Amino acid sequence: MKFNDLKISTRLTLGFGLMALLIGLMGTLSVVLARSADKAFHSIIDDRFPKVLHLHVAKEDVTGVELALTQMLLDTSTENVQRHQATINAKRQQITQLFETLAQQITTPQGKAALAETLRARGEYAAQLLRYSELVAAGRMDEARAVLTGSMVAPRKAYFDALDGLIDFQESLAKTAQADAVAAVSTLNVSVLVLTGLALVAGAVIGFGIVRSTTGPLRRAVDAARAVAAGDLSLPITYRGTNETAQLLQALQEMQQSLVHLVGQVRTNSDSVSYASAEIAQGNNDLSARTEQQASALQETAASMEQLNATVRQNAENSRQANQLAQTATSIAVQGGEVVADVVRTMRDINDSSNKISEIIGVIDSIAFQTNILALNAAVEAARAGDQGRGFAVVATEVRVLASRSAEASREIKGLIGTSVERVEAGSALVDRAGQTMSEVVASIRRVTDIMGEISAASTEQSQGVDQINEAVTQMDHATQQNAALVEEMAAAAASLNQQAGELVQTVATFKLPDCQDQAQVPVQEPRAVVQHRPVRRPLLGHAHLPMAAA
């Protein structure tokens, strides 16, 4: 596949992808080198320098021990000797801890060998130091001085030499690590500069190639578009490849060919438009006459609709009044039904009261009967008593007479109450039938009211419908009159269209076609004389109050 066949998006993707690859490579290399330099610096800070520092501290502690040994000989008091001995012990313990730490930190064979030599020299020095301390503790100062200036000299020198050698070795390793770190940083800087230069050069080359392969076809497309805008359709448009710019040139070529064909058709059809416009003008003239007749018919229809509207409105008003009367009758019937219901409830209450009175009379009759029996028993007992119970017998006789009268009176009242209860029940039955009749009357009146309401609603809807029809007819009349005016305007527009068609032919002739051949033209025909008819705009009779809506 050629480079020109690649799409612009593909070119940009490849270019930016290559740049991204270079940038990613530069970033990756930078990260790797930076990690190497960081590792070297961390090795110096975390490994080399602490070892050197520990060795220097150990050497200072050994020097402190030597100083304490000398001070012990200068002042042989017990207090001074004990104080310096404590200092020596503390220094020796600290030195031991430092060497234990160094033994864990030193990993190289040379470093371990130097550390072992230092520890061996320290052991010999420690043996002489222990002997010196014992002599001082025993008060044998002359012998201690002889040890300090005699047998301890060689072990001391060997100890310090071994310690200095170990320090020099660790310092040399630290310097080497520092040099490696500096070299890594230098390599990082050089690599970043080289990759940056390569990225810039590659970006410039890729950008130049993309711009050159894109702007050339675009320039040809601009030239072709300007030629078409100037009316020159003869300029050849060529393209190579299948990318977006080639597709643009191909689209412009197709547009040019379509315009050539279109201009030829416009030249051919513009004269036909002129002839057709004359026919349209004549047709508009005939349409104007028919529109005038339609306007007259609509005016008569509007007058008839007005009369029908008045009749429907009168019917709606009558039905509305009848509906109101039916609603009033319904209200009265409902009130009468409620009154009858109250009467029914009252009769039922009277019936209940009569039944209760009858029950009370029964109780009174029972009491009179029992009183009569008691009086009879009293008379029997008085007869047995003889003369002594004679007065009691008289009283019992009177009580029996009163009980008999009470029983007879209660029977008469019970009979009257029974007659009253029968009449109340008969009245209650009549009132119940009257209540049912009133309910049926109320239901019938309600049905009549509902029917009258439906009739009233239907009449209202009919009135509204007639109003809408009347308004529509009025709008149609107004629209018809406006249409007549529009027909006149269309006739004038058709004449103007014929003139503009001729001008269009001249305008299209300015286009330069590739074959330079004139298209066949249909002769322009003059439009026939147009007789304009203006419709008579008569006012609608009896429609002054109706709205006139625009078509």
Image: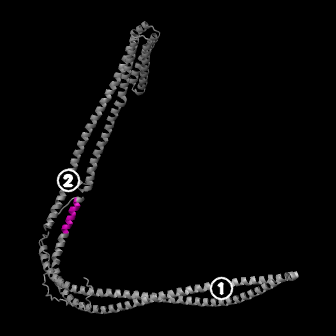
**Where are the magenta residues, as a range?**
245-257
Relative to 166, residue 404 above or below:
below
Judge depth for marks 1 and 2 and give the one in front. Answer: 1
x and y, in percent, of residue 513 in the image: 14, 70
Element under label 1?
A: helix
* Cα separation between marks 1 and 2: 123 Å
The residue nearer to you, when weighing 197 against 310, is: 310
Q: Which residue is mark 1?
A: 354
Q: Which residue is mark 2?
A: 211
The residue nearer to you, when weighing 96 against 370, is: 370
Q: Residue furthest top?
A: 142
Identify the residue shown where x is 27% and y is 93%: 300
The residue nearer to you, when weighing 456 against 205, is: 456
x and y, in percent, of residue 169 in the image: 35, 23
Element under label 2?
A: helix
Main secondary structure of the magenta stretch: helix
Relative to 95, residue 510 above or below:
below
Identify the residue shown where x is 25% and y is 53%: 12
Within-10-Å neighbours for mark 1: few <14, some 14–19, many 20+:
some
Three-letter amino acid code at disc 1?
Ser
Within-10-Å neighbours for mark 2: few <14, some 14–19, many 20+:
few
Using the image, tell me which numbered label, if any, was put on residue 390. Answer: none
Count all numbered tags in the image, as a single digit.
Answer: 2
Of mark 1 and mark 2, the one earlier in the sequence is: 2
Relative to 394, residue 44 above or below:
above
Q: Looking at the rendering, which quadrant does residue 511 occupy?
A: bottom left
Q: Looking at the rendering, which quadrant does residue 466 occupy?
A: bottom left
In magenta segment, residue 48: no
On the question of residue 551 being in view, the answer is no
Three-letter amino acid code at disc 2?
Val
* Quarter of the C terminus within the rendering: bottom left
